[in-house]
Image (cartoon, helix red, strand yellow):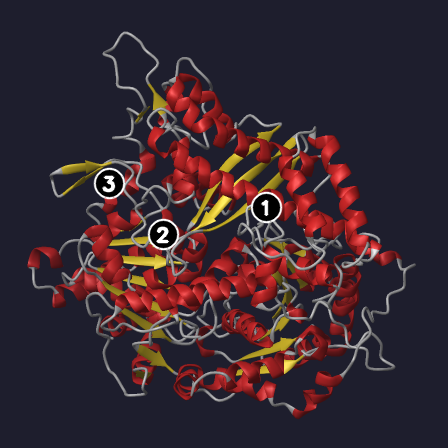
């Protein structure tokens, strides 16, 4: 507060808002049980979570606390923000405040020498991303930042022969000795001789003596120091992790958006192994092992020949069969316009396969006993396991796919024909329209399940030969046979979650094997304790900030510890949640649902939704803002992708007749989303340009965006103020629920384990209980239909918790400076009873929490939670829960030429 008062006195026009903001912040701060607290304590080891709504001063607290701690001898301090761009902005802001920091430090510091020293603030950006940031700075005319990050590679000027280097990927630690007049070097990779003076690594040298280091989530979790680091004056470490470096150097860690940090960690445990490739320059790992084994002696060669041959045969057969169209991995929806995870876990479609074979409806649950019998259908299952009556001929065909020695291009079509005949007859009686997909799913499950087993056999066959087979180390590392430097290498499952992925290109394709491991939920909570001890040998103080850190059931975002500090969103009416759904016609109620439609129907439905939204709601809404709050006469309309944002923008521009009122978020500057033709005058903005939109394009009134890209760390402010320029947010399309994507699946499984048990006198029993819960959740998810409308209600509630977190964050974009926000749910899929309506699911979610969790949620979210619960109990929405709407019910003229460009 003293610093804020001094800033306000020195520069009232810039900092006059700070003292009342921080005074309100600390005056409202309580612990998790509602007791007032006037100060922040950061104990060593335990994670201290501060949950406070957007726009109340968390970012101010983060910057000021870091500076004061560093200046008073309590540093160095690590500040971790969500994205690279944020880390640069945070570092710049702290550097701008240095003069006042020095004045404050003079009063607080114990050491006069330190009090007079300028704070050294260092942004840490991975070298591989520096060129990207330099290009962004150049496009925005930021010469100072461009000079910092645009240094390039010094070796380009020294090279005299050999392959031309790629300026974007300089070989900093990948040089190899090729002979010459100088002394011979040892074999293997060599460091660049210019590394000691190269500007690309200035940030590492500066970080070693920094008072404050600022970096982003992903760099802390997975970043590496390419510069060798001397530790304790005794040893030199090559390839040290960024996490080890900063935890050794910094006594205090402050992490913004701690729930997003955990979510990033859930996906950062991924390791990828290229098995086989067609039509590219890179060779797959299996090909590399085959080439390298020519140097093995006969005995060692015998040990790997059979396992390698099996893995290569299955990989080659599967990839080539996909490339020629005999097999496919995508679901029917993924083959449309909907992006899928691209990830296939053997067993992830077991539910639909089992239901089809049994001839039961898609909403029929499969018991564990039936599921166990079904698994015996596949080769390599439990020997002698019982099959359901009449399934033996089908099992024989799947065994043929693996064991029959015949050309694969001729074998698979014959097997598919025979399987079709078997599935047509009793006991299956599968309809002709469903046989092709079912046969494909059975063969894919068989081939990839066997390939996964073959890779594990190859791993153990080659693990002792890694000195002679360098490529074998990649298999061992990906499949978990080698220890890595992750402090918690395995999660609640006790093993990695593995799957396959195919990437196609015009010359061929690649088959890769991916594994997800680690324990992100435990690691986040124990970052200053177990993780810091395992990584750097010390305890650290960690403060995590977020508006949505405590949200039980949200697998990716919920932090599994009670918040140490809470600021309740107590302002009545600060957030209001409303139904914004619209009808396809003015004559009768035909609400437009987008989520759940087939992909080829969505573009025209989205167009119609935007047109009707303007006519029924947006035009009047903006007129009201122009009268009552003209400085905030802006609104945000969110879809799930750039493509949907583009359709929203095109339709609204036509409906309102003022293209200059509409802005559309695009991936590349000046380029509209592929497949969308935008009217002339529509403003195209990238995420880096959004925050300046009110200044650069003051006439824009509606900003069409992709929700996943803007829900966090975006501040669109009224120029010259700290107040949000947005008055409302309209969620045009229900967010996608990808419970079977790699990250979401792993997060859900690991969160189920992390939420089980509690520390006690018998840790072995607790770990066993966590493992049992994780396996039960994994098996349940693999047996669950991935479509939201077909999920069990409790799983829908879990998905809803994650969606609520993102919607609260999205509403926060309009809360900067404490401004109120109106949130509207436009897609009728939010309210359609057939798809699991949002209000009733919200009541189910809240009712299923225990009394303590309910009370804490009310204490943490205050009026924000009240707004959502009011929506759930709104009697005017009851009719939506029982309305049966024909799908699709979108009145669109097929002859309308305005849709030709969509």
- Write the residue at 67% across / 48% down: 395
Residue 709 x/y as whole percent:
55, 59
Tell which residue pokes out farthest to the bottom in this image.
875
Residue beneath disc 3: 205
Q: Quadrant of residue 586?
A: bottom right
Furthest residue toward right: 895
Whole-percent x, y for residue 740 in the image = 57, 59
Count of residue discs: 3
Cα separation, mark 1 vs mark 3, equals 56 Å
Percent position of residue 568, x then y: 39, 83
Q: Earlier in the sequence, mark 1 or mark 3?
A: 3
Q: Which residue is mark 1?
A: 379
Question: Looking at this view, is 560 or 769 the one in front?
Answer: 769
CA distance separating discs 2 and 1: 39 Å
Helix, strand, or loop for circle 2?
Answer: helix
Determine the residue positioned at 68% across, 87% down. 877
Q: Residues within 10 Å of mark 2 (few under 14, many from 20)?
A: many
Give the mark toward the camera: 3 or 2. Answer: 2
Residue 197 seen in render: yes
Q: Position of residue 749 (x, y in %)?
A: 46, 63
- Above/below status of 415 relative to 218: above
Question: Circle 2 sits on which residue?
Answer: 221
Disc 1 is placed on an element classified as loop
Q: Is residue 902 visible?
A: no
């Amino acid at each position: 507060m003293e610093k804020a008062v001094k800033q306000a006195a020195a520069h009232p026009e810039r900092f006059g808002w700070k003292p009342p903001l921080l005074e309100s912040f600390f005056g409202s701060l309580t612990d998790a049980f509602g007791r007032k607290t006037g100060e922040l304590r950061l104990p060593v080891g335990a994670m201290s979570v501060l949950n406070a709504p957007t726009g109340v001063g968390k970012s101010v607290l983060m910057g000021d606390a870091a500076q004061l701690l560093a200046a008073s001898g309590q540093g160095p301090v690590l500040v971790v923000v969500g994205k690279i761009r944020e880390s640069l902005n945070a570092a710049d802001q702290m550097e701008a405040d240095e003069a006042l920091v020095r004045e404050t430090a003079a009063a607080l510091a114990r050491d006069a020498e330190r009090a007079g020293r300028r704070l050294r603030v260092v942004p840490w950006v991975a070298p591989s991303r520096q060129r990207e940031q330099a290009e962004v700075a150049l496009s925005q005319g930021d010469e100072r930042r461009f000079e910092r990050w645009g240094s390039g590679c010094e070796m380009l000027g020294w090279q005299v022969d050999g392959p031309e280097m790629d300026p974007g990927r300089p070989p900093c630690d990948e040089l190899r000795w090729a002979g010459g007049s100088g002394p011979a070097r040892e074999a293997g990779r060599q460091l660049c001789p210019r590394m000691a003076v190269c500007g690309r690594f200035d940030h590492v040298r500066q970080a070693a003596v920094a008072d404050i280091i600022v970096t982003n989530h992903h760099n802390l979790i997975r970043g590496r120091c390419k510069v060798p680091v001397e530790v304790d004056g005794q040893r030199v470490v090559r390839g040290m992790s960024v996490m080890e470096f900063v935890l050794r150097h910094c006594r205090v860690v402050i992490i913004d958006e701690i729930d997003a940090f955990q979510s990033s960690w859930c996906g950062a445990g991924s390791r990828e192994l290229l098995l086989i490739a067609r039509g590219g320059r890179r060779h797959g790992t299996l090909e590399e092992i085959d080439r390298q084994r020519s140097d093995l002696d006969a005995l060692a060669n015998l040990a790997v020949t059979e396992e390698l041959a099996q893995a290569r045969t299955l990989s080659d057969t599967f990839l080539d069969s996909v490339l020629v169209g005999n097999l496919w991995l995508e679901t029917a929806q993924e083959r449309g316009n909907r992006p899928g995870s691209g990830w296939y876990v053997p067993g992830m479609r077991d539910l639909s396969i089992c239901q089809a074979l049994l001839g039961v409806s898609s909403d029929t649950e499969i018991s564990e006993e039936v599921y166990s019998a079904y698994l015996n259908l596949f080769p390599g299952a439990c020997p002698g396991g019982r099959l359901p009556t009449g399934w033996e001929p089908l099992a024989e065909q799947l065994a043929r796919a693996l064991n029959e020695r015949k050309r694969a291009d001729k074998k698979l079509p014959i097997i598919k024909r025979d399987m079709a005949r078997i599935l047509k007859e009793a006991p299956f009686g599968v309809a002709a329209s469903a046989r092709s997909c079912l046969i494909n799913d059975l063969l894919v499950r068989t081939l990839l399940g066997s390939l996964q087993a073959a890779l594990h056999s190859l791993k153990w066959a080659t693990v002792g030969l890694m000195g002679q087979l360098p490529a074998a180390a990649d298999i061992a590392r990906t499949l978990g046979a080698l220890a890595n430097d992750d402090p918690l290498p395995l999660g609640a499952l006790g093993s990695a979650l593995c799957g396959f992925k195919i990437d196609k290109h015009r010359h061929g394709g690649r088959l890769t094997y991916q594994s997800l491991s680690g324990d992100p939920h435990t690691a986040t909570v124990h970052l200053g304790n177990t993780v810091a001890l395992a990584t750097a040998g010390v305890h650290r103080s960690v403060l995590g900030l977020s508006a949505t850190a405590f949200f039980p059931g949200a697998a990716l975002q919920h932090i599994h510890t009670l918040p140490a500090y809470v600021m309740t969103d107590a302002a009545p009416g600060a957030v209001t949640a409303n139904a914004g759904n619209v009808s396809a016609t003015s004559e009768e109620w035909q609400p437009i649902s987008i989520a759940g439609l087939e992909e080829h129907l969505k573009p025209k439905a989205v167009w119609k939704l935007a047109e009707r939204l303007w006519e029924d709601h947006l035009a009047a809404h903006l007129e009201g803002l122009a009268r009552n709050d003209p400085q905030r006469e802006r609104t945000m309309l969110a879809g799930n992708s750039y493509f949907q944002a583009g359709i929203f923008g095109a339709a609204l521009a036509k409906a309102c007749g003022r293209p200059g009122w509409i802005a559309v978020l695009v991936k590349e500057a000046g380029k509209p989303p592929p497949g969308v033709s935008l009217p002339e005058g529509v403003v195209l903005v990238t995420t880096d340009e959004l925050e300046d939109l009110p200044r650069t394009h003051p006439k824009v009134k509606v900003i069409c965006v992709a929700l996943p890209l803007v829900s966090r760390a975006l501040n669109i402010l009224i120029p010259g103020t700290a107040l949000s320029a947005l008055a409302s947010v309209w969620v045009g399309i229900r967010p996608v629920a990808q419970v079977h994507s790699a990250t979401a699946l792993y997060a859900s499984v690991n969160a189920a384990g992390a939420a089980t048990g509690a520390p006690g006198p018998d840790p072995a029993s607790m770990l066993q209980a966590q493992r049992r819960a994780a396996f039960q959740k994994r098996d349940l998810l693999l047996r669950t239909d991935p479509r939201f409308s077909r999920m069990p209600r409790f799983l829908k509630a879990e998905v809803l918790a994650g969606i609520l977190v993102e919607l609260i964050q999205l509403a926060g974009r309009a809360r900067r400076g404490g401004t109120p926000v109106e949130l509207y749910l436009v897609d009728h899929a939010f309210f359609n009873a057939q798809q699991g309506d949002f209000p009733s699911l919200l009541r189910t979610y809240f009712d299923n929490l225990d009394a303590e969790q309910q009370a804490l949620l009310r204490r943490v979210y205050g009026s924000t939670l009240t707004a959502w619960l009011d929506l759930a109990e709104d009697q005017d929405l009851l009719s939506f829960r029982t309305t049966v709407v024909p799908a699709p019910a979108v009145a669109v003229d097929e002859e309308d030429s305005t849709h030709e460009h969509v």
